[in-house]
Amino acid sequence: MGLTAVIVSVDGTTPRLLTVASQDGEALPSAALDDGADTTLEKGVRRLVSGSLGLPVRYFEQLYTFGDSKRAPGRRALAVAYLALARHQPLSGPANPRWRDCYELFPWEDWRQGRPAVLDGVIVPALERWLGRPSPAQLPTRTERAELTFGTGQAFWDPVRVLDRYELLYELMLVDEADRDRRAGLGGPCTEVAGAAQAWAGPLGGPGGHVLPSPFAEVAGIGAPLALDHRRIAAAALERLRGKLAYRPVVFEVLPEAFTLSALQQVVEALAGQVLHKQNFRRLVAGANLVEPTGELQQRTGGRPAELYRFRREVLRERPAPGLGLRRLGGL
Amino acid sequence: MGLTAVIVSVDGTTPRLLTVASQDGEALPSAALDDGADTTLEKGVRRLVSGSLGLPVRYFEQLYTFGDSKRAPGRRALAVAYLALARHQPLSGPANPRWRDCYELFPWEDWRQGRPAVLDGVIVPALERWLGRPSPAQLPTRTERAELTFGTGQAFWDPVRVLDRYELLYELMLVDEADRDRRAGLGGPCTEVAGAAQAWAGPLGGPGGHVLPSPFAEVAGIGAPLALDHRRIAAAALERLRGKLAYRPVVFEVLPEAFTLSALQQVVEALAGQVLHKQNFRRLVAGANLVEPTGELQQRTGGRPAELYRFRREVLRERPAPGLGLRRLGGL
DNA sequence: TGGGATATGCTCAAACAGAGTATAAGTGGT
DNA sequence: ACCACTTATACTCTGTTTGAGCATATCCCA
């Protein structure tokens, strides 16, 4: 039983996650659960994050438990993964901690400078090859899956479906670890995650598909891999975080005490991987009463000075945010 | 390492969850993880649900991993909980399975007949007593917590925060198992769940509070308890399910193949614990293209016959559902 | 045949989201 | 001191979505 933490911060406009050096290469910080000391899983995570890395973590939540017996060579490794948010700060320590740019791991997820080149350069062609040789029964399913996850065809790009996309790329052998796992005799189906998989093959059955033989491995893998299945875990974390942005004020946990509205917007944009309409964003934030001015100004913005704001922690209790009116019933 | 399943169905207008008889009393179906057979956690759950109960489960997703070493007497019991959806059907089996009315467990969650009596009868008075004797530092925090979770004061009732409410009731000793756990020397802080707790005590620190001494235990506990912490797990499941209703078409997994719009609405209302505006609900469903008419009519509705519809499974792939535009950024 | 019940269709206003225009107030160079 | 440039902030306009209610259709049953 292990614990794994995906610790996220934002450095200016760059979303980052913390990695450490491990015997298997760059990895997410992990630790075995100490049955004596860790009376709760949360305590275990705090020990892992605050203790060994000395990092003040401002928010965390349980992400997912990965239990595939094939996820690591040899042993069955059950890992409870946590998502954590921290303010950006310099790192040091025996484990060689490092703030990694999230979009080095997931280059296709950053749409802030427009549609990422890797999509049309590598991914879409690979998807087309994948769709080009279908068993007739599979074709519609595959087409739909490709369209929905990557927003080809009619569908839109949904910034939240990070994990779906990663898993499809894994199946297509477009990420290095797919090939690596296959060589190691692992690389079973990507089924085991977040309730995402089973949507494809109808009720219950996960894709059940194994990774493709090989012919798609001609290109160098996209993005930077991590040890074991840690990049998958990171994908699940980014998905969760993006989803959370929409209904809970979590961004503030990676922002300093006082910040400008532009800074706030940049952080949201960094995590969402999308640009937002500036004026409307401002209206939204103001309307929600999420922040209050500190009275200070930030000079040297390069233009007009910006007012500094702080998060109104009270809103954590105020927000009407009725979860299920007809209003929020977009999905059903 | 155990698996626990919260299997939900809807019987007419009654949401139900499956319980079995155990040595500790009525419990959720659980099983130890079989390291040999269960190469993935999902397989383990399928074995648990389909295998031992013979129930066709149409959807499931991992819910949460409960790892508090105090959650059961003696041993450390780590349990991965899954949420599962099934169509309602008669049960039988050696484990004495039974469809329990969800709102027997959580009477305060059903607002379909108006504000539940137990709120003003028991809960609000207890909250007021709780707020009446605060250490001065605690008062604002407690007030805010009470208001947000139970929608007293300014705040609205948020149908989704099922777990928050259960946990507060547990701390207030208003549910039987709180007292039971205390006697058994368990009943540590309720911290360990779903990222809900830490919202209260500011960054990181969970409430850290232990259950109250005793003076609140004068009333009989509210609702029907389950073994161990299973009612907490059920609360987490209901919360997840209510949240999911808003953005994923999961209701259809508990509905029969063909259904009327009224039946669909009744199921949503049953799970949400809220009544919805009929005409608008209809407009919403039609507008989302979620269903298509079968051409059949259902007679004997007591009034005009209703058209029968089926779920358009294709929408699982169509839905544009852009997750993060400014549009969906209500929470931030 | 008429009353009651449910299903279904349509209207209307308020709130909201997306996009654009205009103005304010700094910085840095000349 | 003045200029161009940059960023911040305010306001407008329009189409869409939501909440709520009214009206009509079509059955059952007494």
Image (cartoon, coloured by chain):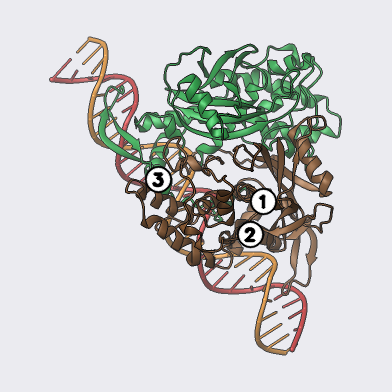
Chain colours: A green, B brown, C orange, D red
Mark number, residue B227: 1
User: Going by the picture, which residue comes out furthest to the right?
Assistant: A136
> Pointer 2: residues within 10 angstroms few (<14), some, or many (20+)?
some
Q: Are marks 1 and 2 on the same chain?
A: yes
Q: Say which of A67 and B85 sits in front.
A: A67
In the rendered image, the vertical position of residue B223 relative to residue A140, given as above or below:
below
Q: Say which of A136 and A29 sits in front.
A: A29
SS for callout 1: loop
Image quarter of residue A117? top right
- Whole-percent x, y for residue A101 in the image: 52, 19
- Whole-percent x, y for residue B230 in the image: 65, 48
Judging from the image, mark 3 belongs to the subunit labelled A
| Amino acid type for the residue under numbered disc 3 | Val
SS for callout 2: loop
Q: Name the residue under label 3.
A: A315
Residue located 49% across and 67% down the image: B121
Q: Is residue A69 left or right of residue A252?
A: right
Q: Distance between the residues labelled 2 and 3?
A: 33 Å
SS for callout 3: helix
Image quarter of residue A182? top right
- Whole-percent x, y for residue B165 in the image: 52, 52
Judging from the image, mark 2 belongs to the subunit labelled B
Say if residue A111 shows up in the picture. Answer: no
| Amino acid type for the residue under numbered disc 1 | Ala
Judging from the image, mark 1 belongs to the subunit labelled B
Q: Say which of A332 and B161 sits in front.
A: B161
In the rendered image, the vertical position of residue B327 relative to residue A326, given as above or below:
above
Label 2 with label 3: CB-CB less than 8 Å = no
Q: Name the residue under label 2.
A: B224
Q: Do labels 2 and 3 share a chain?
A: no
